[in-house]
Amino acid sequence: MKLLENYIIEKGNVLPGNVLKVDSFLNHQIDPALMKEIGLAFSHYFQDLGVTKIVTIESSGIAPAVFAGLEMNVPVVFARKKKSITLQENLYTTSVYSYTKKEANDISISKNFLSADDTVLIIDDFLANGQAVLGLLEITEWAGAKVAGIGIVIEKSFQQGRTLLEKTGIPIYSLARISSFENEQIKFLEEA
Ligand code: 5GP
């Protein structure tokens, strides 16, 4: 997605450890005009697959997921990272190793919001080593839900996430695919 690539080039910063900082439009401040285009792109790509629900992880997956949900006219459920008084039981919970925080966190989804009747589209902001999406796949499997696709805003294709997820056979669509950060220069794979 050319628009997204332009945002990344103009506003992104490469941090040590192959981390891309995109706080000004995706991870802290959110650009609604860009999110609208992202929602449209996901909804075009994954239309006709019978998606009944979008599943993501708080917090940075929520904005792109909600815009896709609006276009596809389906609800969005996000896995929560902390248990709250209102979210303590009746949960699917798994542990996910965080690429940016370098620690494992539990993520949970209420059994009320995911069931064997659902066909799920998983959306996340970044794909690095694939742990976040694998955690969501585990939870959807426990719920007996089908997974129709995986939509990623920014894929770091030089890390192992894509290869790991391709083994599942689930269609993956990444809006920007970064091939390298050499000398802090951001390079993209050619669009298919
Ligand atoms: P994975 O689980 O695929 O290793 O990493 C994906 C998760 O880590 C995403 O949900 C995202 O929050 C975070 N992440 C991974 N790489 C980056 C990065 O380069 N920049 C930012 N901002 N977050 C990242």
Image (spheres, grey):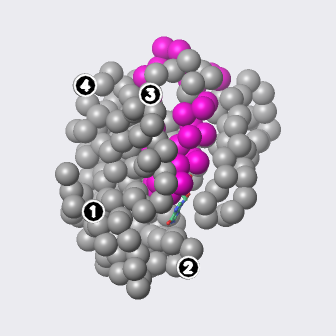
Give the mark, 1 or 3, whose residue is nearer the N terminus.
3
Identify the residue position indicated by label 1 in the image: 189
Q: Of discs 4 and 3, which sits in the foreground? A: 3
Q: Label 1 CB, ligand 1: below 8 Å? A: no
Q: Which mark is on residue 16? A: 2
Alpha carbon separation for disc pair 1 and 3: 26 Å
Give the mark, 2 or 3, whose residue is nearer the N terminus.
2
Give the mark, 4 or 2, whose residue is nearer the N terminus.
2
Identify the image quadrant of the N terminus: bottom left
Mark 2 closeness class: few <14, some 14–19, many ≥20 residues within 10 Å: few
Q: Label 4 CB, ligand 1: below 8 Å? A: no
- Label 2–label 3 contact, CB within 8 A: no
As helix, strand or loop, the secondary structure at mark 3 comes to: strand
- From which residue to which does the magenta span run? 111-139
Label 4 sits on what residue type?
Answer: Asp
Give the mark, 4 or 3, whose residue is nearer the N terminus.
4
Label 2 sits on what residue type?
Answer: Pro
| Quadrant of the image occupied by residue 143 | top right
Alpha carbon separation for disc pair 4 and 1: 27 Å
Residue 25 appears at what percent x and percent y? 41, 67
Does the rendering let one see residue 11? no
Residue 9 appears at what percent x and percent y? 31, 76
Q: Of discs 4 and 1, which sits in the foreground? A: 1
Q: Residue furthest top?
A: 117
Q: What's the residue at 27%, 62% (across, down)?
A: 189
Q: Is residue 50 above or below residue 45?
A: above
As helix, strand or loop, the secondary structure at mark 4 comes to: loop
Identify the residue position indicated by label 4 in the image: 48
Alpha carbon separation for disc pair 2 and 3: 34 Å
- Label 4–label 1 contact, CB within 8 A: no
Label 1 sits on what residue type?
Answer: Leu
